[in-house]
Amino acid sequence: MAKKEFSFNEAVVEIEKILRNIESGDLDVDKLAVEVRRASELIRQCQKKLHTTEEEINSIFKDLV
Amino acid sequence: MTEKLSLTELQQIIKDSLYIALPDLYWVVAEISEMKENYAGHCYLELIEKQPDEINVRARVKAIIWSNRYRFLKSFFESITGESLQEGMKVLVRTKVEYHELYGLSLVISDIDPSFTFGEMALKRQMIIKRLEEDGVFSMNKEISLPMFPQKIAVISSKNAAGYSDFINHLKKNSYGYVFHTALFETVMQGIETEQSVINALDNIAEFQGLFDVAVIIRGGGSQTDLSWFDNYNIAYHVTQFPIPVLTGIGHEKDLSVTDMVAFQALKTPTAVADFIIESVAEAENHINEMSSEIVESSRIILEDNRNMIESYRMNLIPVARLMLSDQKEMLSVRIIEMINFGKDYILRAGLLPANQKSRLISATGTMSLARKSEIERSRIDLMNFTLNMLEKIKTSTSGLLNTLKILDPENVLKRGYTITIKNGEIIKSINQLTEEEVIDTQFSDGRARSKVIERQKTKDKR
């Protein structure tokens, strides 16, 4: 667990924050681009976590029992 | 005292005495401490009564249910209580006391009252629930929040249970294509060892806190649905204290065990547990997707607004730029005409100049007007570039736009000495729009003047 764990919950909280920011309409176009890029990166990571097998986790699990 | 009895004779006396003393069938309350079914289908039991301390035994007797009765009583009992007859259970049985020369005393059971056991079980369950409530722990596991994406699952089950493979297969074949990670913590799911085995598994999982999102306790369905092993204070207590949500699928149609009641979520079957997990993930993914499209939609609106704003600035900018251009052109044209006229006059006046000087003068005039022309062209290009740059700047940063645009505000153009001529509220762009004696307004940066057209002169080479 040396690597920083990706956290779904943190990702979702951040996406929610970005959405609120964008919806507030206070963002200028430059910041908007940055935020949208960040959100899409987070969403991509979530999707990846949901759909790809992680050998690392599986091997940890196998060692447990 | 000289009479001697054979052992058989003595046994016969005992047997006869008992038969006379205990002629009837008796309803007896007892606890099953041992129970075995032999090859012929007869059921051999040991019945006990415990001391009030519930540990020491104060009475013990052998009992038997003959196979023909046992087959009937077994299924009758299960149909009423939802449990099979088992060790540790309190029962009310109708018995006949029998004595056998070879096997000694035993109770022959001819009937069982399942409602007594059912009541006992309910009572026991009620007491466990009450105790958990009094401890203030009953709903602690329910109060934990389920991770949005319960992907890493600790499974408490026995490897060979049908329920376990159902669960794993169901997860694997989920229609969304999600990947789940499971680790099996093998346990005994039935019988006297259940308590310790399940508690050990829970402790093991708790040690790897942070590795798992959720723990599930699952067991195959079928007729073997002895729920009472999970009507257990210690198991239930461990579940309430568990650091991650516990889902149960112990496979009982009718009733919930206490463990089910205190779990984060109780489901009927292992398959239902798998569905619950899959749907939780799907819900969370749906939430993300919704946010994703909201972000796209909101961003699109913002960009659209910006584009509209830029467009309206551009629309405002074009007339100003045109105005500036035509002003300059006009000014230059006037100069060129003046110059040509001047040149003509000069040539006329100096009519006697040598021909070569004349032609030099003409070409000089031409050169000058050419220079002027290219100057116009240059400033036109400059202005265009300036305008384009400005638009570019607006596109990249909308925030600084207003400040930047002030430079191009018609008002500032006026400040630089240009004026706008207006007739009846319309901007006059051509002398053709005016006639002599007509009243016109002139807009300065700091005011407006009204005047009358006294003379109207058209620039000659202008169409």
Image: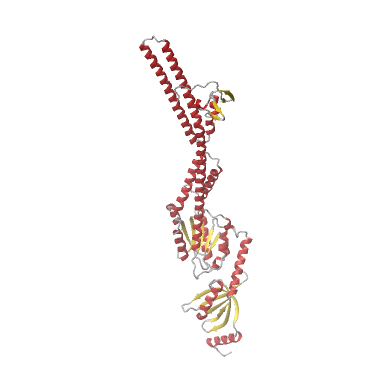
Q: Which corner quadrant of the image does residue B19 belong to?
A: bottom right
Please tell me how many numbered marks the rendered image carries: 0
Q: Which corner quadrant of the image does residue B3 belong to?
A: bottom right
Give above or below for B147 relative to B62.
above
Q: Residue furthest right?
A: B134
Give above or below for B446 relative to B300.
above
At a point 52% along the width and 81% down the height, the residue shown is: B103
User: Residue A18: horizontal and vertical position, in percent?
Assistant: 53, 44
Q: Is residue B444 visible?
A: no
User: Residue A26: horizontal and vertical position, in percent?
Assistant: 55, 40
Q: How is the image coloured?
A: secondary structure
Give above or below for B240 relative to A35.
below
User: Residue B322: horizontal and vertical position, in percent?
Assistant: 48, 29
Q: Residue furthest bottom?
A: B3
User: Residue A41: horizontal and vertical position, in percent?
Assistant: 47, 45
The answer to which of B180 and A35 lies nearer the viewer is A35
The answer to which of B181 and B32 lies nearer the viewer is B181
At a point 55% along the width and 85% down the height, the residue shown is: B11
Q: Is residue B423 visible?
A: yes
Q: Residue furthest left?
A: B356
The answer to which of B433 and B322 lies nearer the viewer is B433
The answer to which of B84 and B455 lies nearer the viewer is B455
